[in-house]
Image (spheres, rainbow, N blue to C red):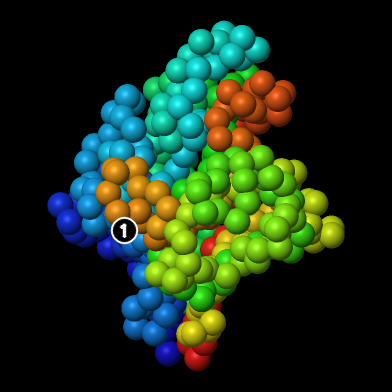
Amino acid sequence: MANPTATIEHLKGEGLSVFRLKNRFLSLDIAPDLGGKIISLRSGQALQTEWLWKNERTPYQPAQLDHSYTRQHDTGGIDECFPSVDACELPANAGDRAGLTLPDHGELYGRPWTHQESAVHSDGTATLTLRQLCQTLPLTFERRLLLAPDSGTLRFEYRVENLSDSPVPFSWCMHPALAIAPGMQLRLPDHHQLYCSYASDNAPLTTGDQFRWPLTPNGTDMSVIPDPDTDSGYATKFLSHQDLFDCTSGNSRAIAGLENPATGEALHFVLPPAEVPHIALWLNYRGWAGDGGVPYFNLVLEPAIGNADSLRELLDRGTAPTVPPRASRSWSFEVHATTPGLC
């Protein structure tokens, strides 16, 4: 019997050029011309479980630096937010970058990534490497995806290179919009301390609250996805108050993800706190929509470097990550898909 192998295909779908990485446990579609957006991530029996939410009201389109992500590009799937999430102007302590304006949700989404390498290696692992030269800061951003030949493991490897002679600050998060259903379980490391940077009306906490997962100050268990048809809809944003070492008890990894008790399926993000120290959560239980239409029902779980909504805030605090002059910074993590009965 031949050894198992993952595959990679170059396809056309929805008017897009798409790379499909696939094995019998996982399938993912990546669109390099949309900033490396992952438009589909499927697992389960016959790969029928789609984990990513898609906004059917907002079409895919090229992005410009002055665009609003939430109004024009909140299409779902997985985007990369870099070098800031919120639009901001860098403060005086940013040195020769002071006064520079960074765009909403960064500058990588919705733009063609210029460098593409794909391969299936001798061990059966399929890889796709995409790279982009930033416009706002003198950095190159590289993401390498590795799909194991015979497991539900997808590895993300990142490398940012500084092309200048001075340190360059940045923040980063991956922005996966996940498809959810009432009764699903949201998993975060127990007792991880979070703070609320935004809470809409009807949310079970208020902006500025701090709490340890999963119970809010009023005792609401945030780990259960509510039913917005029976409960009041709301939206809220959480960010790590401290890094993930506050809850790992010396373990080398923290696990966050989405679990479906009805099917036993799960999608877990396995994060090394030394490399990916923060988590952000956008819980939108029919409480908000960027296009002004009917509010969405989705969830965004973000592995992150930097626990603020903008790079300016991190610089104001003195906690902004940096890339040293003429050097690089790397990080990585894994995503695991679990399907009962598939082994």
Q: Position of residue 327 (x, y in %)?
A: 61, 27
| Residue 192 appears in the figure | no
Instruction: Judge by depth and name the residue closer to the eye, 84 or 29.
Output: 84
Q: Quadrant of residue 65?
A: top left
Is the residue marked by circle 1 packed among few (<14), some (14-19), or many (20+) residues within 10 Å?
some
Q: Is residue 301 visible?
A: yes
Task: Name the residue furthest right.
Answer: 250
Which residue is at the front of the view, 162 or 218?
A: 218
- In the displayed structure, would residue 300 be above or below residue 143? below
Instruction: Say which amino acid is labelled 1.
Output: Lys
Location of residue 274 in the rendering, given as x and y in whole percent from the top left corner: 73, 47
Viewer-proximal residue among 175 and 147: 175
Q: Position of residue 117 (x, y in %)?
A: 37, 48
Most foreground residue, 13 or 121: 13
* Residue 81 x, y percent position in the rendering: 47, 39
Residue drawn at (24%, 48%), measured in percent from left and top?
58
The quarter of the rendered structure image containing the N terminus is bottom left
Per the image, the residue denoted by label 1 is 54
Q: Identify the element where label 1 is drawn.
A: loop
Residue drawn at x 65%, y 56% as measured from the top left? 271
